[in-house]
């Protein structure tokens, strides 16, 4: 018989059957019982304790009636197995094992008045009452004790391994209880995952495929809510290594993989998560190659821009580690090929998204692959396709990633050049890469200097062989006067004159330089202003037919001049003031001016089409003092960078830009 106070409305949580120490099934704990409140887990605390024995006669019933109850103050401890007192005495001389409790009841008053009690039904000993000062304190104890009892049942899951139906039913109830448990403690989700992992790892040989799938499906709701413990990752690794990767198991772990990839995951601190994602992708690949692509596409979503910024860097980290494992860890040939092919598919899918290609190229600029991979013909073929994709992209930042990240380290362009580790032809692929690069960033002064310092000999060799694009690179070096050594200058001219294409481009350069001779002569005006209707042809005609060696100020405001005239403007040796207000100058022309007119002190770009891409090049104008960026596409971030780099800058017009305060 269970003693109940008549005036108390009890919420019951049945924990064991009428048979001693055997749990039976009841509806799981509901979150509504806590009114949405979350409670820290208690392990100890002080409360009032009263113990009531079973009533054997009328006298005992009177003695244990409510008015005559005696309460003791105890410091209670909640361990993994029982409730005990810090100082055993009185009612708490002996601890109470969780398995001895058949029911836990808490009173819910109609009002807010005490007492606030929890009632434990102990079939063999009677009842134990705990009394508290507030409803919150009572509920915190109630749910903490409830969790401790649930945890003790979770730890005994392995005892039901021989009774599959009972195991699944018990696991379902425990998982539902954990999902509804209003306790703020990571163990509420981690403990059942660890218990299931141990069950599958230690008793896997006793568990059939259907039961394994059922266990994981029951556990799935928790997998979506918490980070995976290393034990669960090892469990998944064991499953995949045994070639047991059914569609159902993959679907169970899908939300967990998505959670890892979409968030800021420290793979250095949690390597088991990286290995888990790697194993998952390989399992997808084994299931069906297209499933890897479909999974990555689902992460990116159908939007033009991926809404999850961490997906790409996380995926690259996992993929690089997987490629390293192929060449640095012991695998049989089948596994090596499997992992390699899987992550080639991953990379191919990633660089297929236009919004990812720029960041991917930057992440791979340092050539972060093992040396053995660069020598592998299969991997070389994949890298060649990826580099061609990078070269064909319209973004200059992507092109720059093919070049060295710093002068002392070889870049992709070196590896695919004749004699490079990835080159398996006579330079055809290298020439193809240069055909795209030379039209963009390779004509920039900084890029040309980088290539001059690291690949001048190769360009000279390819020019002798008549390669059009390497010839164009050498001509650009001469055009921008970047060859300071006279011997090197003569060697380049000799290389150019050794082929018909080289001679043709060199003759064109000589003709162009002759046009600049008069323009650069000393004398002429100090200031020049063109009428508002002037075009590129008008400006070039004026500059080619006069002496402008003394020209310090050039005003092109409100003209139709474009970036095409930049090649002539940069030849003005004394220019320090340039006004491009409301012209059609864009980033291409601004980059040329910034890299070749270091003496500029004032620059007016008001109402031009320049963006951050071109404005970033202003850092080369170290003498710049006055800058007008009114009504341009300047960002606040770029302005902060310019303000830090341009130490001489005194006057800046930021009106109608993002950086305008």
Image (cartoon, rainbow, N blue to C red):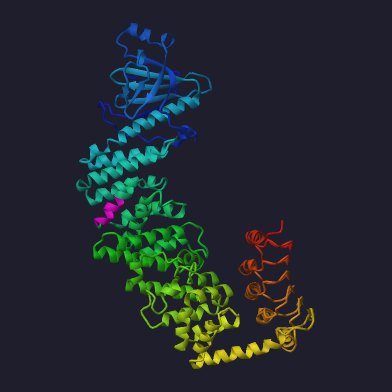
Q: Main secondary structure of the magenta part?
A: helix
Q: Residue at x 40, y 28 (%)?
A: 43
| Quadrant of the rendering where the C terminus is positioned | bottom right
Q: Nearer the viewer, residue 20 or 525?
A: 525
Q: Residue at x 44, y 51 (%)?
A: 265
Q: Residue at x 48, y 70 (%)?
A: 404
Question: Residue 393 appears at what percent x and percent y?
Answer: 51, 74
Question: Residue 387 appears at what percent x and percent y?
Answer: 44, 73
Residue 15 visible here: yes
| Quadrant of the rendering where the N terminus is positioned | top left
Q: Nearer the viewer, residue 423 or 208?
A: 423
Residue furthest to the top: 59
Residue furthest to the bottom: 500
Question: Residue 360 appears at what percent x and percent y?
Answer: 47, 65
Please tell me whether residue 100 is drawn above or below residue 518 in the rendered image. Answer: above
Which range is magenta? 235-242
Please tell me whether residue 81 is drawn above or below residue 245 in the rendered image. Answer: above
């Amino acid at each position: 018989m269970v003693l109940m106070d008549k005036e108390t409305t009890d919420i019951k949580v049945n924990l064991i059957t009428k048979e001693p120490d055997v749990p039976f099934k009841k509806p799981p704990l509901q979150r509504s019982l806590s009114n949405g409140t979350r409670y820290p887990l208690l392990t100890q605390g002080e409360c009032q304790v009263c113990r009531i024995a079973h009533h054997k006669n009328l006298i005992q019933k009177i003695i244990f009636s409510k008015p005559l109850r005696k309460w003791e103050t105890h410091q209670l401890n909640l361990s993994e197995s029982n409730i005990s007192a810090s100082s055993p005495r009185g009612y708490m001389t002996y601890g109470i094992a969780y398995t001895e409790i058949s029911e836990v009841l808490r009173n819910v008053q109609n009002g807010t008045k005490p007492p606030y009690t929890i009632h434990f039904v102990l079939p063999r000993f009677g009842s134990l009452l705990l009394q508290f000062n507030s409803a919150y304190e009572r509920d915190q104890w109630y749910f903490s004790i409830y969790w401790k009892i649930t945890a003790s049942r979770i730890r005994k899951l392995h005892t039901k391994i021989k009774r599959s139906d009972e195991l699944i039913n018990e696991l379902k109830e425990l998982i539902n209880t954990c999902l509804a448990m209003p306790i703020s403690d990571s163990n509420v989700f981690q403990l059942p995952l660890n218990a299931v992992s141990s069950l599958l790892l230690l008793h896997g040989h006793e568990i059939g495929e259907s039961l394994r799938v059922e266990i994981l499906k029951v556990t799935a709701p928790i997998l979506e809510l918490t980070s995976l413990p290393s034990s669960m990752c090892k469990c998944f690794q064991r499953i995949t290594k045994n070639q047991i990767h059914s569609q159902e198991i993959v679907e169970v772990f899908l939300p967990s993989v998505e959670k890892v990839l979409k968030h800021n995951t420290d793979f250095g601190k949690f390597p088991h998560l990286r290995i888990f994602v790697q194993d998952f992708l390989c399992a997808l690949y084994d299931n069906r190659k297209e499933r890897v692509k479909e999974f990555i596409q689902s992460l990116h979503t159908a939007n033009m821009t991926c809404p999850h910024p961490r997906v790409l860097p996380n995926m690259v980290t996992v993929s690089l580690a997987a490629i390293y494992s192929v060449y640095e860890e012991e695998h049989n040939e089948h596994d090596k090929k499997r992992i390699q092919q899987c992550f080639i598919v991953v990379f191919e899918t990633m660089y297929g998204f236009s919004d990812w290609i720029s960041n991917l190229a930057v992440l791979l600029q340092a050539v972060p692959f093992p040396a053995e991979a660069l020598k592998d013909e299969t991997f070389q073929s994949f890298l060649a396709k990826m580099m061609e994709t990078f070269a064909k992209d319209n973004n200059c930042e992507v092109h720059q990633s093919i070049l060295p990240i710093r002068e002392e380290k070889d870049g992709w362009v070196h590896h695919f050049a004749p004699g490079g580790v990835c080159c398996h032809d006579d330079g055809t692929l290298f020439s193809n890469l240069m055909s795209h690069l030379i039209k963009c960033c390779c004509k920039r002064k900084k890029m040309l200097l980088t290539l001059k310092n690291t690949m001048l000999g190769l360009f000279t060799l390819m020019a002798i062989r008549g390669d059009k694009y390497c010839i164009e690179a050498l001509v650009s070096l001469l055009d921008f006067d970047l060859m300071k050594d006279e011997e090197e200058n003569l060697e380049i001219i000799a290389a150019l004159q050794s082929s018909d294409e080289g001679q043709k481009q060199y003759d064109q350069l000589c003709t162009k330089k002759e046009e600049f001779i008069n323009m650069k002569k000393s004398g002429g005006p100090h200031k020049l202003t063109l009428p508002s209707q002037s075009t590129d042809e008008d400006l070039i005609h004026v500059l080619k037919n006069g002496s402008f060696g003394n020209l310090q100020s050039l005003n092109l405001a409100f003209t139709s001049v474009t970036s095409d005239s930049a090649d002539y403007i940069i030849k003005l040796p004394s220019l320090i003031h340039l006004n491009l207000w409301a012209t059609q100058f864009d980033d291409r022309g601004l980059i040329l001016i910034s890299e070749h007119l270091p003496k500029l002190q004032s620059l007016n770009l008001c109402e031009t089409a320049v963006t951050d891409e071109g404005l970033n090049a202003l850092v080369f104008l170290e003498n710049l003092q006055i800058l007008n960026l009114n009504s341009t596409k300047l960002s606040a971030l770029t302005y902060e960078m310019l303000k830090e780099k341009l130490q001489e800058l005194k006057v800046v017009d930021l009106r109608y830009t993002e950086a305008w305060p």
